[in-house]
Image: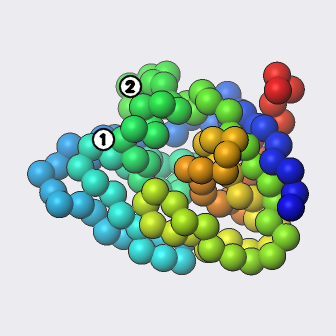
Amino acid sequence: MITLRRYRKRPDQAVTAIRLELDTEGLRYHKWGAEQWARAGDWLVDNRGDVYTVAADVFARTYREVAPGRYIKTTPVWARRAQTAGTLPTREGESHYAAGDYLVFNQADETDGYCMAAERFHAMYAPDDAE
């Protein structure tokens, strides 16, 4: 298995986000090749046109506000390039990825993960030399 490497989001990569303060049993939507699920209190994120949700506890732990409605991810991630296509279970559902995409995790133990196309990953993240 390929070793994970630690990365940080580039400081110019702020997202626009709003908390889903709705009286709802949940919000279902289709993204990353599968059905996703958000709950009341989760965050709706617009990451340069890529719109998705982030669980409330994960958002609180990993993002900080830099301007009204604008947030930057402040915690490191651990990532590796996928050798083959597959499916990654996520907090919101599951995501399908292709060979060459990145599997990205908020925890070094490969939990709380998501996947991204390599070009997008390299535009948003840089190796963290503070390992």
The residue indicated by pointer 2 is 68
Q: Give the foreground label among 2 and 1.
A: 1
Q: Residue 92 versus residue 71: which sits nearer the camera?
A: 92
How many badges with numbers are in the image? Answer: 2
| Above or below 70: residue 26 | below
Q: Residue furthest left?
A: 23
Residue 70 at least partly seen: no
8 lies above or below 1: above
Tell me where residue 66 appears, x and y as whole percent.
49, 22
* Residue sitting at x 76%, y 37%: 7
- Residue 74, can we see it? yes
Q: Earlier in the sequence, mark 2 or mark 1?
A: 1
> What residue appears at the point 87 percent right and 57 percent down from the top-left corner?
2
**What residue lies at 86% left-to-right and 51% top-to-bottom?**
3
* Foreground of the two, 3 or 50: 3
Along the horizontal axis of the image, is 3 left or right of 55?
Answer: right
Check residue 61 in the rendering and tell me which mark sits there, or answer none. none
Local packing at callout 2 (Cα closer than 10 Å; few below 14, some 14-19, many 20+) is few
Which quarter of the image is occupied by the C terminus? Answer: top right
Spot occupied by residue 65 in the image (x, y as percentages of width and height): 45, 24
Q: Position of residue 118 (x, y in %)?
A: 78, 59
**Image coordinates for residue 36, horizontal then vertical, percent:** 41, 67
Q: Using the numbered discs, state the Cα–Cα distance from disc 2 to disc 1 in whole angstroms.
A: 12 Å
Amino acid at circle 2: Pro
Q: Secondary structure at mark 1?
A: strand
Secondary structure, mark 2, is: loop
Q: Dot 1: few (<14), some (14–19), or many (≥20) neighbours within 10 Å?
A: some
Q: Amino acid at mark 1?
A: Arg
| Residue at the spot of label 1 | 19
